[in-house]
Amino acid sequence: MTQTPSDFISGILLAAGLSTRMGEPKQLLPFGKSTIVETVVDNMLGAKFDEVIVVVGHRAEAIQKQLGTRAIKTVFNPDYRDGMLTSAQTGIRAKKENGVFALMLVDQPFITSALIDQVVDAYQQTEKGIALPSYNYKRGHPVIFNQRYAQDILALNAESGGVRTLFKKYSHDIHYVTVDTDAVLRDIDNREDYKRALREA
């Protein structure tokens, strides 16, 4: 059965990390006319998400202050030091109970609203329960999940290998959306990535 456009879609942004490789909170680094986290959140707000949930942890107050009065829901992940999986689980618990959800990473400011919508539209037109963008046969973000996968993710633990283990387990239920840009893959992990990103911002 294909999805319906009426499916409530929560965009969940994982923004709680320690940014150890960067050496300072990359969420708050200047980017374009604002910061990395603001750029990503604004791209999400401009897309076809019915709500945007921002999961915070490290430097939570500073990030919330930076995001100001934007129409978002922020939730605190007390276990943020334990890795990204705990943030995904925190976001899923905060979303609408029976809604579809999309996971996004805070260090991918090149994913535009239009790219997000391309994946949302594809998800709504497929019978598959997972939709994600693919560039040169590599998986990118956002990853959109049917509600039925919420419990699978909530059941994962630190030794499980994380959300990506679902891609192998449910490979038959994935719709790959071919895109013509590596923006869905690019993240900002370290200083070199950041310098390169600033040149293109």
Image: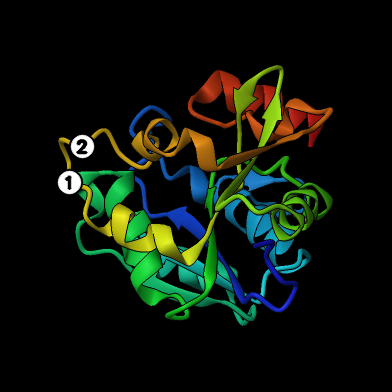
Q: Residues within 10 Å of mark 1 (few under 14, many from 20)?
A: few
Q: Is residue 181 above or below residue 38?
A: above
Residue 178: percent from left, percent from top:
77, 31
Residue located beneath label 2 in the image: 160
Q: Position of residue 37 (x, y in %)?
A: 58, 54
Under circle 2, the secondary element is loop
**Which is nearer the eye, 201 or 161?**
161
Amino acid at the residue labelled 2: Ser
How many marks the image carries: the answer is: 2
The answer, for residue 18, to whether it is visible in the render is yes
Would residue 60 be seen by someone viewing this image from the given angle? no
Q: Which mark is residue 171?
A: none
Between 114 and 164, the one nearer to me in the picture: 164
Mark 2 nearby-residue class (10 Å; few <14, some 14–19, many ≥20): few
Residue at label 1? 157
Point out the image quarter for the C terminus: top right
Left/right of residue 169 with respect to residue 38 in the rendered view: left
Image position of 22 with respect to 97: above or below: above
Q: Are marks 1 and 2 in contact (CB under 8 Å)?
A: yes
Find numbered disc 1 in the image and state the secondary structure of the residue it sits on. loop
Query: Disc 1 and disc 2: Cα gap in Å?
Result: 5 Å
Which residue is pictured at 52% across the width and 61% down the height? Answer: 146
Q: Position of residue 41 (x, y in %)?
A: 64, 61
User: Residue at the spot x=52%, y=24% of the render?
Assistant: 191
Vertical placement of residue 61 versus 180, above or below: below
Residue 92: x %, y % from top left = 39, 66
Q: Is residue 189 left or right of residue 197?
A: left
Q: Is 133 positioned to the left or the right of 55 in the image? A: right
Q: Residue at left 30%, top 39%?
A: 162
Q: Depth check: give the residue in front, 176 or 41.
A: 176
